[in-house]
Amino acid sequence: MAGFDRSAFKGASSSRRKSQIEKNEEKTQLKKKSSSNSGNKMNYLKLQKGKNYLRLFGIHPATIEKVGFENASDMYAKTVHFMECKVEYTKDGEKVSEVKRVPVLNSKVHGGTKKDVIDEYINYAHKVAYSDIQDQDERTKFLFPLKDWKTGITGKTKWVAYAKSYENKSKENPVLGRIDLPVSVVNKMNELSAEDDDMEDVMETDIFTDPDTGMVVVITSDPEAGKSDPSKYYQVAPDFRGGADAMTDEDLAWLIEQKPLNEVYENVYKAKDFYMALDGLKRFDEKYGLGIFSYDEFLDVVEEISGYYEDDSEQELNEKEDSSVEAKEDKSDLPFDLELEDMDMTQLKGYIRRNNLKIKVLPNYTTEQVAQFIRDEEEIIESEKQELEKQEPVRSSRSSRLSRFDDLED
């Protein structure tokens, strides 16, 4: 392509990629005891059994422009938990709702938060198992649903890249698309790049992603060998015989048209993802009888995490509340028992704030739910003042708080 500027395209740094993997592993570490596409439709490439010939793209120019070359990468982590959740979609023009096992994003990886509600559930389940269950066999049985490959909800990480997949070593029938690479494969690629470096003058660009000098990486998938030795499931090698496989101008033009992966996987976790995760956890907890939602300490964590997320409608609501609170001050101060059910959401939130009630209003709550939470909270406060809350106070408080996370699918 005449006049095409190739200088904007950069290969990746294997050392930086290795650092990214280590940081992602820290985020997801659980605290346990002891040729071109038609149109704009994305091709999702998969590693097939046998040999896979991939030419990996380097860093997207838009990523470099946004975050700088030193902070940009060719690959980004995707960490998901598979859970049974209620999902809605349209089929043949009809809205369908069903419960099915689906991937749910991890908030620490995809939202940059300190905690993820699924990770915290798993951590707390281990805490309960080791503090409350003394028999080792019973403890193993209790934790089994969390770890089982069919039912488990532990996060699984892969690294996503844009790539050109060839049908064979002759580099025939190339297909461009997005591919998920196992962590073990990316680690091996980093090792191979390091081996190729001059140790006195370590190269910044790895051997696979430079647009001009990068080589095809051959990834061999052998499930049978992996059964006896997991380290042999994937074998990774550069295609030295094929030599450098320069990206064409058409390849690079295709990359420009694709959405930068940092925009796909970084800071994309929203309130709807939290609600889906919480819905899945409640279903899991009830199905397997772990009872984690019966602990106030865990509910404290859930409420803390819920404060991370505000969707667009909640932000808009807050802005409206801030601008109109003075005009509605008189109505918000009307007697609680007479006017609560007549308040709109802005007035209810103003009432909660002025009375210092420990209630977190999430975007999916209705005015009826919030009004009931206020009644429950004020009853508890009143009983404490009168020193009458002596009969199972924790349980009554827990029941009220747990109800706030009901009906998330509404």
Image: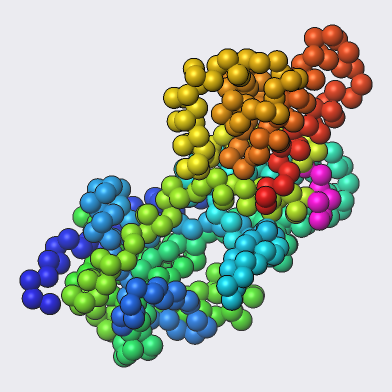
Q: Residue furthest left?
A: 3
Identified at 59% across, 47% down, the residue is 274
Front-lying residue, 179 or 317: 317
Front-lying residue, 12 or 380: 380
Identified at 84% across, 38% down, the residue is 132
Q: As drawn, is 47 to the left or to the right of 82?
A: left
* Residue 314 to residue 277: above or below: above
Front-lying residue, 345 or 362: 345
Q: Is residue 181 magenta?
A: no
Identified at 17% across, 61% down, the residue is 8
Per the rendered image, the range of residues in magenta is 286-292
Identified at 56% across, 49% down, the residue is 272
Q: Is residue 291 magenta?
A: yes
> How many numbered marks, from 0 up?
0
- Give how far across and how far down residue 239 sits, in percent: 32, 80
Q: Is residue 391 visible?
A: yes
- Give how far across and how far down residue 164 sits, in percent: 33, 77
- Give how far across and how far down residue 405 sits, in percent: 71, 41
* Residue 76 to residue 91: above or below: above
- Give how far across and how far down residue 379 sits, in percent: 80, 20
Q: As drawn, is 372 to the left or to the right of 387?
A: left
| Applied colour scheme | rainbow
* Residue 66 to residue 248: above or below: above
* Residue 267 to residue 402: above or below: below
Q: Is residue 207 visible?
A: no
Q: As drawn, is 369 to the left or to the right of 198?
A: right
Indicate the quadrant containing the N terminus: top left, top right, bottom left or bottom right. Answer: bottom left
